[in-house]
Amino acid sequence: MISTRVAIPALAALLAGALLLAWQQAHWAFVAGTALSAGAPLGFVLSHHFSATPLTAHPLSVSIASGLGCVAVMVAETRFGPDHRWALLVALAALVVWMLWQREQRGRWPGRRD
């Protein structure tokens, strides 16, 4: 599992991949998909970090947004070619970091239901 102290810099670094894609003038679908897959979890983790409420349920909307970003990158690779194939690895890594972080957060509170 991944702690918040690790998740925030990891997701920020993965979000920087979207900036690198924009700098390389990749198609907007690569940039948007990578930004969505890393940005949605990063925004949630940052907002949760500053709140005192425990994470009691899986934030499904964030998982959907991150997964949708991965799908956008896959579609972009199919449609526009494999020149930026590494973007899918970045998007999937963001989804994995998100899943491990939220699982660790839900696992630390007593009385959870799994």
Image (cartoon, rainbow, N blue to C red):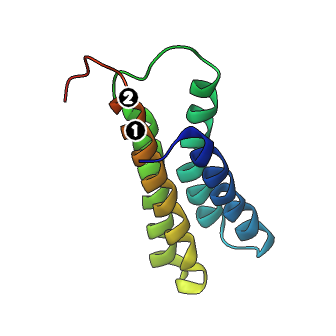
Q: Are marks 2 and 1 in contact (CB under 8 Å)?
A: yes
Compare residues 80 and 87 and report the one nearer the observer.
87
Single out the residue that lies furthest toward the left: 114
The image position of residue 5, as x and y in percent, is 62, 42
| Residue at far right of view | 23
Q: Position of residue 97 (x, y in %)?
A: 48, 52
Residue that numbered label 1 is attached to: 104
Helix, strand or loop at disc 1?
helix
The residue shown at (57%, 39%) is: 4
Quadrant in the rendering for residue 86: bottom right
Please report the residue visible at 33 percent of the width from the left and 32 percent of the height from the top: 107
- Real-space Cα separation, disc 2 to disc 1, in angstroms: 6 Å
Q: Residue at x 60, y 66 (%)?
A: 30
Q: Is residue 85 above or below residue 72?
A: below
The amino acid type of the residue labelled 2 equals Arg
Alpha-carbon neighbours of circle 1 within 10 Å: few (<14), some, or many (≥20)?
A: some
Q: Nearer the viewer, residue 48 or 66?
A: 48
Left or right relative to 103: residue 12: right
What residue type is disc 1 on?
Glu
Q: Position of residue 41 (x, y in %)?
A: 54, 41
Horizontal relation, residue 79 to residue 15: left or right: left
Front residue (pair 74, 17): 17
Task: Name the image quarter holding the C terminus.
Answer: top left
Q: Residue at x 61, y 54 (%)?
A: 10
Q: Residues within 10 Å of mark 2 (few under 14, many from 20)?
A: few
Instruction: Label 2: state its secondary structure.
Output: loop
Q: Which residue is mark 2?
A: 108
User: Relative to residue 85, is residue 41 depicted above or below?
Assistant: above
Q: How many marks?
A: 2
The image position of residue 72, as x and y in percent, is 48, 60
